Image (tube, rainbow, N blue to C red):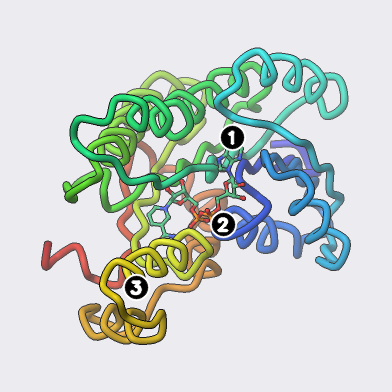
């Protein structure tokens, strides 16, 4: 890897992607290349983020292949290479089992979009580089009203394993993190939906949820970022093709 590490993060405007950017952004030797479809939110956060690393922010919808092709040509011109790619952009829309439109929407972002970014980043990836994909505990388990999300995350886990073997000759590691119950806007949006369906307040739903979790708390996005940071470290050079569950133990009871 080169001395200035170039870290490309999708979904960096909020939640886990933002926490990953904050973690790598503490190191002045890093150059962050941050992508999000919500460029206004990304820009607003960066105004006050005070990161030590050099930061470049780009608007990008990972489901838009042609837009990504143009962007990656620009990234190659401006940055030359990428050392670490973190795919965090994703959506969690629920769907009825017969809902074909919702299926395509979720698969387009979570599976096709993540694959497009991996595919377009490959020529830029330095030998010895890292790819880290944010999958989900629902890359292993099923959930009602979530055929599309579960399929997208199972697909991402499978893609991670196969890509790890493809890129192993270049010493590039590819791993998936399988989070659950991470306290981000995505989780809060899901809890708000449950609260309105159940006719309860958000606080009641949050309390009920915590009671069901072995650690009795949600996981902080910074804890996910710390795992991503480890996967990008020299100590993790031999760790590849793995699916690392970070869920406070809740998956054991599924
Ligand atoms: N929060 C959790 O408990 C949890 C659990 C399991 C998996 N995950 C996964 O972790 C990842 C991050 O989740 P989060 O909780 O931070 O979500 P979040 O909704 O808080 O943040 C997601 C970010 O991705 C961006 N994004 C969404 N679609 C995009 C697209 N098409 N192109 C570019 N950017 C896009 C959003 O604008 C947002 O900034 C997701 O892939 C999610 O499925 C989260």
Mark 3 or 2: the one toward you? 3
Q: Is residue 193 above or below residue 114?
A: below
Depicted 192 relative to depicted 126: above or below: below
Tell me the quarter of the image containing the C terminus.
bottom left
Question: Who comes first in sequence, dot 1 or dot 2?
Answer: 1
Residue that numbered label 2 is attached to: 229
Quadrant of residue 50 in the image? bottom right
Residue with the mark numbered 3: 195
Classify mark 1: residues with Cα within 10 Å, few (<14), some (14-19) or many (20+).
many
Q: Secondary structure at mark 3?
A: helix
Tag shown at residue 129: 1
- Where, by quadrant of the figure, is residue 104 drawn? top left
Left or right, 188 with reference to 53: left
User: Residue visible at 52% across and 67% down?
Assistant: 221
Helix, strand, or loop for circle 1? strand
Judge the density around disc 2: few (<14), some (14-19), many (≥20) Cα neighbours within 10 Å. Answer: some
Q: Within 10 angstroms of label 3, few (less than 14), some, or many (20 or more) residues?
A: some
Q: Residue at x 26, y 34 (%)?
A: 151
- Image location (x, y in percent) of residue 244: 33, 53
**Which label belongs to residue 144?**
none
Q: CA distance from mark 1 to mark 2?
A: 13 Å
Q: Indicate whether 15 appears above or below 222.
A: above
Q: CA distance from mark 3 to mark 1?
A: 42 Å
Mark 3 or mark 2: whose residue is earlier in sequence: 3
């Amino acid at each position: 890897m080169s001395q200035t590490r170039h870290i490309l993060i999708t979904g960096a405007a909020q939640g886990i992607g933002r926490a990953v950017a904050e973690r790598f952004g503490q190191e002045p030797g890093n150059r962050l290349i941050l992508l999000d479809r919500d460029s206004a939110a990304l820009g607003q956060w960066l105004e006050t983020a005070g990161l030590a690393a050099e930061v470049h922010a780009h608007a990008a919808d990972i489901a838009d292949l042609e837009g990504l092709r143009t962007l990656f040509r620009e990234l190659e011109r401006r940055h030359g290479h990428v050392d670490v790619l973190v795919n965090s952009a994703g959506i969690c829309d629920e769907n009825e089992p017969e809902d074909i439109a919702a299926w395509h929407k979720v698969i387009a972002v979570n599976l096709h979009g993540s694959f497009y970014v991996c595919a377009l980043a490959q020529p830029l990836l330095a030998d010895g580089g890292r790819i880290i994909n944010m999958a989900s505990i629902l890359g292993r388990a099923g959930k009602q009203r979530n055929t599309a999300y579960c399929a997208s995350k199972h697909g991402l886990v499978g893609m991670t394993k196969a890509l790890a073997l493809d890129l192993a000759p270049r010493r590039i590691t590819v791993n998936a993190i399988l989070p659950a119950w991470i306290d981000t806007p995505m989780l809060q949006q899901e809890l708000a939906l449950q609260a309105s369906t159940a006719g309860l307040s958000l606080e009641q739903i949050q309390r009920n949820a915590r009671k069901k979790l072995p650690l009795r708390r949600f996981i902080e996005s910074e804890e996910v970022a710390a795992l991503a940071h480890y996967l990008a470290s020299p100590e993790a050079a031999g760790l590849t093709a793995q699916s690392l569950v970070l869920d406070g133990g809740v998956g054991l009871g599924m």
